[in-house]
Image (cartoon, rainbow, N blue to C red):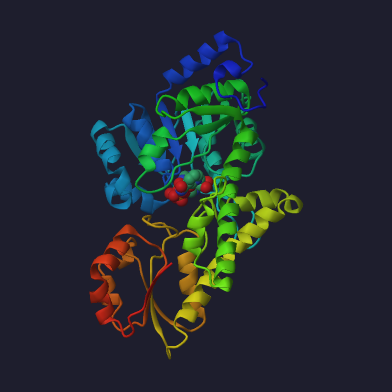
Amino acid sequence: MTYSQNIPDVSGIDCPPHRVSQLEAMAQAYQQVCVVGLGYVGLPTALLFARNGLTVHGVDVSPRVLENLAQSRVGEIYPELSDWWQEVQASEQFCASAQPQPADVFLITVPTPVNPEDKRCDLSMVRAATESILPCLKAGNLVILESTVPPGTTRKLVQSMIESYTGLKAGENIFLCFSPERVLPGSTTTHELVHNHRVLGGINPDSAILGKAFMARVMRGEIFMTNDITAEFCKLAENTYRDVNIALANELSILADEYGVDMPEARTLINMHPRVNLLKSGIGVGGHCIAVDPWFFVEASPVNTRLIATSREVNDRMPEYTAQKILWDVDDIDQPKLCLVGLTYKPDVGDVRESPAMRVVEILQEKGVDVVSYDPLLPEYQDQSLEAIAQGVDYIGILVSHTVVMETITQQRSALESVMRTPRIRIF
Ligand SMILES: NC(=O)c1ccc[n+]([C@@H]2O[C@H](COP(=O)([O-])OP(=O)(O)OC[C@H]3O[C@@H](n4cnc5c(N)ncnc54)[C@H](O)[C@@H]3O)[C@@H](O)[C@H]2O)c1
């Protein structure tokens, strides 16, 4: 088996056993970890290493993030991280600041958004994060990029910045990997971080072996080694797979509406086929991953990504279609007043990045429709109740089915209907 193939075990890599042992011993000896970017991925990662006895220095350029950590507000913002935060506070294995410090291992977990105008990956934060660690790097360090990036970024951007600044040779006296994150933000984050299988690509076999041995100190899922470009490619392919399949479900739901077919019922029947698994249709695709990452493939190869680009467009058009459906629902009401509930990009998370629900609200407001919105998971609505907001409206549209919202609808449906001007509720 060659290094360029997917290698499930160190024994598959062309590396002498004594070198593997050396690298594994190095990984065991690492004690100081610097995590750059303390968001949905970086913070739980930092806490995971800290609660396993490593000394972790977290870095973030956002004063708000640092202030929240200083005020110990982690449990409020990420309830799923409460326990880990308490443990780490007690052990004093974690601190955070705006500047990196020398360490053994550097993890980069900063955002890689898509530029809204040209749909190209914005690598400025990966560049800035890499630049910030350069003065701290020394021989023997391991650098792991976790941010989702276009294939080739680890070696073309990060490796070349490291080598030209430090004079070290990546793969020989400083080691570099790309290891994408697969966690689902929300209640399962901590479990997934520890137990998900992960892909880890090294810029050479030594980097991969070292990276795997280090990650395996805290992670319990399988770690599959490969090269950096394959790992970068796999991450984009995973989210593209999801996006294309959701686009198919969404397109079929529009056809179902045209035929007067009930899509949930049709989907149940379709999925009785032993080799079909049609996903649920929805109001669009949001979040920092699925709505973003397929564009990195389109950017790299516009000619060969027609299906991928079209799927993105199908999913991006769903908020417009949803807004239209809402208007059809109230076209018998003069000057309807709408209440749209759920603004985050998916149920039970407080994240509004690329949220299709926010887009639905904007589209209706741009059309001059009277819309109020509500999301109990967002801080700005924390002191408000659905019953108060729904006073006098003609329509409640549940765009995002947060558990707490669905409980309210089930338990207080008649109370809600009694305060509405027209008692019409639709769950998308
Ligand atoms: N959120 C997810 O579920 C998820 C899953 C898999 C992969 N990813 C990928 O992981 C990466 C990080 O995503 P996230 O959701 O954690 O982002 P995030 O926005 O939640 O957090 C990133 C943090 O990095 C900080 N930051 C930005 N530039 C910095 C710099 N130069 N130095 C230090 N800190 C800096 C920001 O202030 C922010 O707090 C992205 O590439 C994303 O695509 C995210």
Left or right of 162 in this view: 184:
left
Q: Position of residue 371 (x, y in %)?
A: 41, 79
Residue 121 in view of the camera: no
Residue under the image location 49 percent in, 32 percent down: 136
Position above or below: 61 against 343: above
Q: Position of residue 319 (x, y in %)?
A: 52, 68
Q: Which is nearer the eye, 162 or 35?
A: 35
Q: Which is nearer the eye, 13 or 143?
A: 13
Left or right of 50 in this view: 144:
right
Left or right of 391 in this view: 128:
right
Outermost residue, right side = 303
Residue 351 in view of the camera: yes
Residue under the image location 42 percent in, 47 percent down: 40
Quadrant location of the N terminus in the rendered image: top right
Position above or below: 2 against 286: above
Quadrant location of the C terminus in the rendered image: bottom left
Q: Position of residue 406 (x, y in %)?
A: 32, 63
Residue under the image location 63 percent in, 63 percent down: 117
Q: Position of residue 135 (x, y in %)?
A: 52, 34
Position above or below: 308 against 33: below
Position above or below: 234 against 206: below
Q: Which is nearer the eye, 62 or 247?
A: 247
